[in-house]
């Protein structure tokens, strides 16, 4: 049956009630408090009962507001004093019944406020766990030097969530590619990847001067080749090209620099190539003079 409420079985010792309620739909659990003294013998959840209206009733060994207030506000402090010896047993039992009734009524009176505070604590706990689960604290620590312009960049906003994993992603081309595909995919932008050999010049050549160094690791000349992964961004259409291209190029360059700083080693370089895979791009005369000389290899 859909949304059927069942009695939980084999729960861990001293299970927190807020944790258990995360697994039940709102409004399907009833909470009662029995006082903190029960914790000396029992766990947080003293009793569980499946009620006739298909709700789960939890009795918790926690203090109500009633338990925190002075005794004399609810019960006579001399209730069991000066009982006649001849009627002591009968009067004692009668006064005890009155006290139990007063305790029950006091719990009922404070129950709405107790439950409200309970759910407030549960919401705070949920927020803290979400805050910790998403590692927002580390996001703020690692990104505390970000500029306001970077924080407003829509692509960098998506990258911030990966900052706590930057050490794992750094140097892992597969994870970097997956991250970029997710970031651009959420914006509806296609991205591809290809590896090319690029030539570089080094005024300080390396030589194979160690026993474990392979021949290919050293070179005598000042020029050498390295494989470079280029990411091809397939973005614009003719209708919005003139209006959005300049802004988009700035956003991509900010993103490239941000990823270069946080997710790539100093030996690596990130290259974005912006392409259009259908009909040739058309530019008006005014915009053509501005964009035609732009190097799209960022």
Image (cartoon, rainbow, N blue to C red):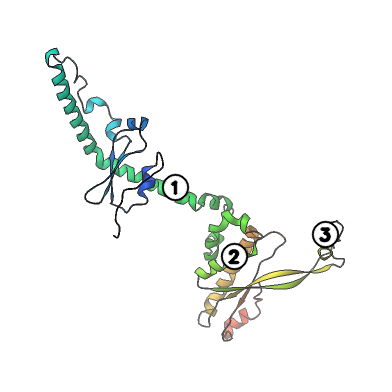
Depth check: give the residue in front, 96 or 167. 96
**Residue 236 in the figure: left or right of residue 125:** right
Q: Write down the residue under mark 1.
A: 128
Quadrant of the image for the N terminus? bottom left
Which residue shows up at 63% across the image and 55% down it? 167
Residue in the image at 51% along x and 52% along y? 136
Single out the mark in the foreground, 2 or 1: 1
Q: Of all residues shown, which one is farthest toward the top?
A: 85
The quarter in which the C terminus is drawn is bottom right
Q: Would you name the residue on which mark 2 appears?
A: 255
Above/below status of 176 relative to 53: below
Q: Earlier in the sequence, mark 3 or mark 2?
A: 3
Query: Residue 28: x, y in percent?
Result: 28, 51
Above or below, comparing residue 67 to residue 10 in the picture: above
> For numbered disc 3, what is the local secondary structure?
loop
Q: Residue at x 35, y 34 (%)?
A: 42
Measured Cα–Cα span from mark 3 to mark 2: 36 Å
Q: Which residue is mark 3?
A: 213
Q: CA distance from mark 2 to mark 1?
A: 30 Å
Q: Are marks 3 and 2 in contact (CB under 8 Å)?
A: no
* CA neighbours of label 2 inside 10 A, class few (<14), some (14 to 19), many (20+): many
Q: Position of residue 13 (x, y in %)?
A: 41, 39
Front-most of 18 and 91?
Answer: 91
- Give me the disc on residue 9: none
């Amino acid at each position: 049956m859909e949304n059927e409420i069942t009695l939980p079985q084999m729960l861990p010792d001293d299970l927190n009630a807020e944790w258990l309620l995360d697994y039940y739909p709102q409004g399907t659990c009833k909470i009662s408090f029995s006082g903190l003294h029960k914790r000396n013998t029992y766990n947080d959840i003293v009793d569980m009962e499946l009620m006739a209206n298909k709700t789960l009733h939890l009795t918790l060994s926690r203090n109500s507001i009633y338990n925190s207030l002075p005794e004399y506000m609810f019960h006579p402090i001399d209730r069991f004093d000066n009982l006649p010896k001849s009627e002591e047993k009968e009067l004692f039992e009668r006064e005890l019944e009155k006290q139990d009734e007063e305790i029950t009524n006091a719990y009922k009176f404070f129950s709405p406020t107790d439950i409200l505070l309970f759910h407030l604590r549960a919401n705070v706990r949920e927020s803290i766990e979400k805050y910790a689960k998403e590692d927002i604290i580390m996001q703020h620590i690692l990104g505390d030097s970000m500029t306001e312009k970077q924080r407003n960049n829509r692509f960098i906003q998506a990258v911030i969530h990966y900052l706590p994993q930057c050490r794992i992603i750094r140097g892992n081309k597969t994870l970097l590619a997956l991250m970029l595909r997710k970031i651009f995919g959420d914006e509806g932008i296609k991205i591809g990847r290809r590896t090319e050999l690029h030539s570089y010049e080094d005024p300080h050549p390396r030589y194979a001067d160690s026993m474990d160094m392979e021949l290919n690791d050293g070179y005598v000349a000042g020029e050498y080749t390295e494989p470079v992964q280029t990411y091809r961004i397939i973005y614009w259409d003719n209708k919005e090209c003139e209006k959005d291209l300049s802004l988009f190029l700035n956003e991509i360059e900010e993103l490239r620099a941000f990823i270069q700083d946080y997710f790539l080693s100093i030996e690596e370089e990130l290259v974005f190539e912006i392409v259009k895979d259908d009909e040739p791009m058309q530019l008006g005369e005014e915009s053509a003079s501005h964009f035609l000389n732009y190097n799209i290899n960022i």
